[in-house]
């Protein structure tokens, strides 16, 4: 079947087809029944006409027989026949025939002679009747002079049988008309007879009858059949009539033109056909309507689904409570949920879940949008990059929930300060504000200050009161960046600068920052290659023990001999190494190199190595030191690890465990740059350092500033009390040395005694005279 | 019932010539059943022919609206009287060529006599009572006999000569009611197969 594009068309077609089949079936059955009933009725009428004819036939036969018998018993007639009185015989016979309106009558004598009143009947034909007459046949149809006739005979007894009186009544049109008039239906009647190999007919009403249809009629004796009569299709009934002689056949043929017979049935069939057609139209119409009722909601759903697919949030009307209504409700519900989910996805995609602020993605879009909007109209906008100064400390010391609380509060405060501007959180403690400026550049400063002030209000997190501080880097578009990426990078550089400048402040991007950044990137790139190229080397600065008056230790100092820049200061590259993590392999190399060098020195000489916080936290320091000691064969107590307080800022317990583990090896631990930074005395309590190195700033001011001497004294006193050695760094003058001796400092280090020297110089020093150096100094 | 025929037949036998031998004639119907009361007549050719003894008196009475007897064989020249023994009138007639007559016997015990001078079959009827029927066979041959219950008629002294054999029966279906066959000189037996039509309905056949 051809596929339908519409459900309703298919339903209509299929149902209409089904109904049509059923109706046509019923209609055909009815029609056939009607035709059958009509046929049966006609047949019945034909049969009853046949019966009427039978009765007529009998009556006629009876009448003729009575007359024949009457004549045959007349004594005079018998006497005439017996005596062969032809004249008397003929006149008596003619008289009776005239009375009966029979044209043909004759006498057949017992010895076979024939005496006829009608010249048309040949003696031979009449003589042929002798046998049936002799057999006792007295009535029947026989063909005489080529036409079937009803023969009736009566024996003439005188007193024995001397012959028969025979009357032959015509079965002609007149007779048949009589029969036709008696019938209830307008039928044609005819008698046909078969004799001597041919059919003959008595009446003219079926003159078209041929021998073929006659024999056909003969084969359908007793039942109705169809045949053509006078060129007209007719329903016919053939009724056998008794014949006079054996070997003859006679049939009464009754025919009823079919068109006439079936006229009423045809009318009924036509009406039935029209009603069927009307019914079909009604069914098709009703099915179409019903299908429409079913498919209309489906079509609406179909259309709604199409619109939903194209992103529209549509609702379909729900009518009723059937399955389609439930489907529509479900559809509406689904649309609602899809909308909800889309909103949620959008939120997830563009918003930070913790603070509810727009996220980096949305910020990028906003930034791009601003760039496009400001193009050509000369308007400015500023990008503020914010960074919470203590976020890391709070997150580490008070835990993530506290850190999160700080972030949420910070977000609230930034949003408050930057009302009307776009605020986003890029991740961690990084926030940005996009400020549309117009002409007034001072507005940028004002917003920066306002943010700093708002953020600097005291805050209570988990019962810990503190004052958050923020650094802000500001880049202004379009001058500081033609695109979002550049602008953001430059704002970041400005933020670094703000942090460098001392935190809690804001800084604008300048082109120099960019140059510095580029240089830094170059250094970083070179530094990656420095180690493998062997550009790094160690210098050693001796430390003098003030009690023994001899060199007691060397501090290993890292130098980078850059192929084009020459010697690069550790101040320049160590922070970069720390930032990039290169400090880990470099630091490990330093430890190995220092240990290997020190192992060649006299056994009372130690080597001190600076270890960065980065190394401490992710450098596998314990393993590195173990390996270095094992490889070099240096005794652990000749290795001194110098750390700064910064290692305590991250790590906590982990740091302490590592320090204890190193101490357990026998490695000495020195606290470097003591007195600057936090200088928390709690560190001294929590870990038993072997040495404090007093920062060079105190030594430089030792003689010029009043408080410095007291501080140095306090430190040495404290250290002595705790049993910790002290080393003064940066000693350059003899007066300083004297002062430090007075304070009871354990050892000193500085240009006054020796500048840092190469490893080979140290070797040479010990090779020439191990004691010389000591004595020299002393 | 009058039974004159066996007596009459015995008379023929006594008059048989010397050059003779018995001839048996058998008459059967279409189904092979014997036909009784068929009249068989032998007409030898030429000098062998011998007429029946002429004359004699016979009676065919009318009693109980019937002729009695039904079949009577008489020689040429015989007289037959027809006494009316019924209280009703009878109108006895014959249209037979052998003897045509009409007897109006209108009173009881009235009797008329008819002289039969010509050989042939005489069918008797009553114009008043159609059912009354009787036959008189007037024969001119000495050898005339009726068949018995076995359908047999035997001529003890049939001459040894070619002959014509005729069989007649009241209901025999043949023109004239009789059949003939030629008989060879030495032929001592003959048979006829005849077709009989049923007797008229009111006829009391058991009476003859």
Image (tube, coloured by chain):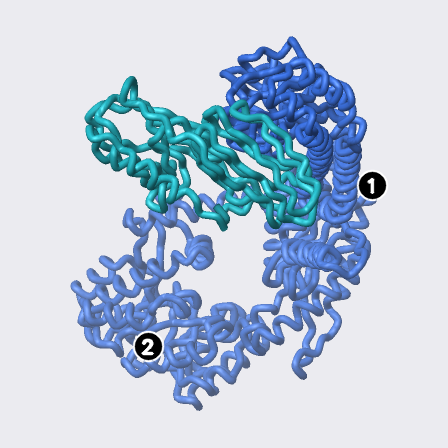
Chain colours: A blue, B cyan
**Percent x, y for residue A309?**
67, 45
Q: Which mark is residue A192?
A: none
Q: Name the residue: 76% across, 23% down.
A: A100
Q: Name the residue: 33% across, 36% down.
A: B12
Q: Would residue A5 be visible to someone looking at this image?
A: no
Label total for image: 2
Disc 1, disc 2: CB below 8 Å?
no
**Percent x, y for residue A457?**
75, 71
**Percent x, y for residue A483?**
64, 39
**Percent x, y for residue A433?**
71, 53
Q: Which residue is mark 1?
A: A439
Q: Who comes first in sequence, dot 1 or dot 2?
A: 1
> Which sits in the foreground, A358 or B53?
B53
Q: Chain of mark 1?
A: A
Q: Give the image quarter of residue A67.
A: top right
Q: Chain of mark 2?
A: A
SS for dot 1 = loop
Q: Give the image quarter of residue B184.
A: top left
Q: Give the image quarter of residue A386.
A: bottom right
Q: Name the residue: 31% across, 68% down.
A: A554
> Which sits in the foreground, B56 or A359?
B56
Same subunit, tags 1 and 2: yes
> Which sits in the foreground, A153 or A747?
A153
Would you place residue B176 above or below residue A711 in this image?
A: above
SS for dot 2 = strand
Q: Name the residue: 34% across, 47% down.
A: A529
Would you place residue B165 above or below residue A357 in this image?
A: above
Instruction: Mark 1 vs mark 2: give the one in front.
Output: 1
Would you place residue B82 above or below residue A193 in this image?
A: below
Left or right of A59 on screen, residue A592: left
Q: Which residue is mark 2?
A: A545
Between the C-alphas of marks 1 and 2, the distance is 66 Å
């Amino acid at each position: 079947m051809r596929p339908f594009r519409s459900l309703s068309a298919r339903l209509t077609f299929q149902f209409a087809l089904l109904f049509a089949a059923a109706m046509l079936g019923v209609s055909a059955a009815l029609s056939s029944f009607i035709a059958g009933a009509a046929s049966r009725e006609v047949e019945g009428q034909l049969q009853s006409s046949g019966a009427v004819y039978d009765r007529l036939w009998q009556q006629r036969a009876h009448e003729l027989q009575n007359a024949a018998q009457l004549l045959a018993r007349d004594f005079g007639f018998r006497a005439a026949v017996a005596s062969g009185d032809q004249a008397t015989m003929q006149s008596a016979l003619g008289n009776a025939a005239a009375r009966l309106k029979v044209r043909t009558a004759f006498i057949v004598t017992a010895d076979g002679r024939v005496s006829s009143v009608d010249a048309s009947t040949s003696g031979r034909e009449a003589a042929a009747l002798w046998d049936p007459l002799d057999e006792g046949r007295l009535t029947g149809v026989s063909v005489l002079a080529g036409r079937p006739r009803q023969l009736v005979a009566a024996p003439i007894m005188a007193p024995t049988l001397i012959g028969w009186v025979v009357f032959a009544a015509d079965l002609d049109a007149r007779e048949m008309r009589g029969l036709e008039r008696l019938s209830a239906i307008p039928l044609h009647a005819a008698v046909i007879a078969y004799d001597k190999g041919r059919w003959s007919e008595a009446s003219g009403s079926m003159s078209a009858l041929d021998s073929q249809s006659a024999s056909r009629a003969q084969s359908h004796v007793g039942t109705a059949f169809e045949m053509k009569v006078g060129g007209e299709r007719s329903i016919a009934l053939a009724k056998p009539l008794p014949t006079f002689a054996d070997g003859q056949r006679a049939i009464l043929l009754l025919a009823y033109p079919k068109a006439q017979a079936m006229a009423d049935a045809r009318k009924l069939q036509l009406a039935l056909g029209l009603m069927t057609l009307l019914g079909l139209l009604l069914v098709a119409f009703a099915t179409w309507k019903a299908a429409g009722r079913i498919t209309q909601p489906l079509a609406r759903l179909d259309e709604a689904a199409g619109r939903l697919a194209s992103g529209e949030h549509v609702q379909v009307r729900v009518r009723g409570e059937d399955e389609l209504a439930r489907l529509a409700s479900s559809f509406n519900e689904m649309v609602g949920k899809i909308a909800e989910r889309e909103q949620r996805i959008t939120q997830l995609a563009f918003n930070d879940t913790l603070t509810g602020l727009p996220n980096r993605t949305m910020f990028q879009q906003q930034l791009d949008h601003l760039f496009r909007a400001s193009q050509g109209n000369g308007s400015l906008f500023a990008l503020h990059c914010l960074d919470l100064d203590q976020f890391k400390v709070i997150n580490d010391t008070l835990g993530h929930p506290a850190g999160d609380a700080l972030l949420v509060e910070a977000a609230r405060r930034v949003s408050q300060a930057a009302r009307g501007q776009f605020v986003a959180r890029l991740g961690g403690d990084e926030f940005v504000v996009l400020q549309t400026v117009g002409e007034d550049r001072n507005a940028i400063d004002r917003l920066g200050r306002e943010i700093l002030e708002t953020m600097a209000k005291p805050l209570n997190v988990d019962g810990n009161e503190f004052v958050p501080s923020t650094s802000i880097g500001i880049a202004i578009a379009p001058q500081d960046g033609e695109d979002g990426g550049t602008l953001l990078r430059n704002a970041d550089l400005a933020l670094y600068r703000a942090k460098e400048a001392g935190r809690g402040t804001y800084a604008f991007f300048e082109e120099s920052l960019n140059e510095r950044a580029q240089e830094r990137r170059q250094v970083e790139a070179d530094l990656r290659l420095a180690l493998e190229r062997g550009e790094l080397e160690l210098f050693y600065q001796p430390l003098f023990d003030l009690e023994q008056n001899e060199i007691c230790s060397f501090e290993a100092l890292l130098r980078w001999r850059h192929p084009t820049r020459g010697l690069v200061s550790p101040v320049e590259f160590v922070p970069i190494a720390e930032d990039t993590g290169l400090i880990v392999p470099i630091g490990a190399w330093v430890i190995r190199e220092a240990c290997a060098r020190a192992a060649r020195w006299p056994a009372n000489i130690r080597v001190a190595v600076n270890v960065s916080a980065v190394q401490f936290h992710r450098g596998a320091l314990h393993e590195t030191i173990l390996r270095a000691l094992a490889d070099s064969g240096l005794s652990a107590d000749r290795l001194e690890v110098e750390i700064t307080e910064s290692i305590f800022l991250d790590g906590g317990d982990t740091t302490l465990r590592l320090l204890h583990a190193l101490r357990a090896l026998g490695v000495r631990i020195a606290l470097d740059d003591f007195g600057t930074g936090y200088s928390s005395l709690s560190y001294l309590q929590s870990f038993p350092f072997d040495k404090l190195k007093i920062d060079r700033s105190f030594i430089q001011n030792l003689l010029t500033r009043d408080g410095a001497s007291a501080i140095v004294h306090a430190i040495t006193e404290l250290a002595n009390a705790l049993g910790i050695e002290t080393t003064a760094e940066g000693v350059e003058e003899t007066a300083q040395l004297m002062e430090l001796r007075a304070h009871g400092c354990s050892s000193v280090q500085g240009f006054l005694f020796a500048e840092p020297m190469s490893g080979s110089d140290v070797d040479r020093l010990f090779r020439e005279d191990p004691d010389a150096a000591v004595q020299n100094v002393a | 019932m009058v039974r004159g025929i066996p007596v009459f037949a015995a008379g023929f036998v006594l008059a048989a010539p010397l050059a003779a031998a018995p001839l048996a004639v058998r008459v059967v119907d279409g189904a092979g059943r014997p036909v009784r009361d068929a009249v068989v007549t032998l007409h030898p050719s030429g000098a062998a022919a011998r007429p029946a003894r002429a004359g004699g008196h016979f009676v065919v009475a009318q009693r109980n609206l019937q002729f009695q007897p039904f079949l009577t064989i008489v020689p040429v020249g015989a007289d037959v009287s027809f006494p009316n023994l019924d209280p009703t009138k009878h109108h006895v007639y014959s249209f037979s060529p052998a003897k045509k007559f009409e007897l109006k016997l209108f009173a009881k015990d009235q009797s008329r006599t008819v002289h039969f001078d010509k050989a042939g079959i005489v069918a008797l009827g009553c114009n008043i009572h159609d059912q009354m029927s009787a036959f008189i066979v007037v024969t001119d041959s000495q050898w005339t006999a009726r068949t018995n219950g076995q359908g047999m008629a035997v001529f003890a002294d049939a001459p040894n000569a070619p002959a014509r054999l005729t069989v007649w029966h009241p209901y025999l279906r043949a023109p004239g009611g009789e059949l003939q066959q030629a008989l060879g000189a030495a032929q001592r037996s003959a048979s006829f197969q005849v077709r009989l039509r049923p007797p008229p309905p009111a006829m009391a056949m058991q009476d003859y």
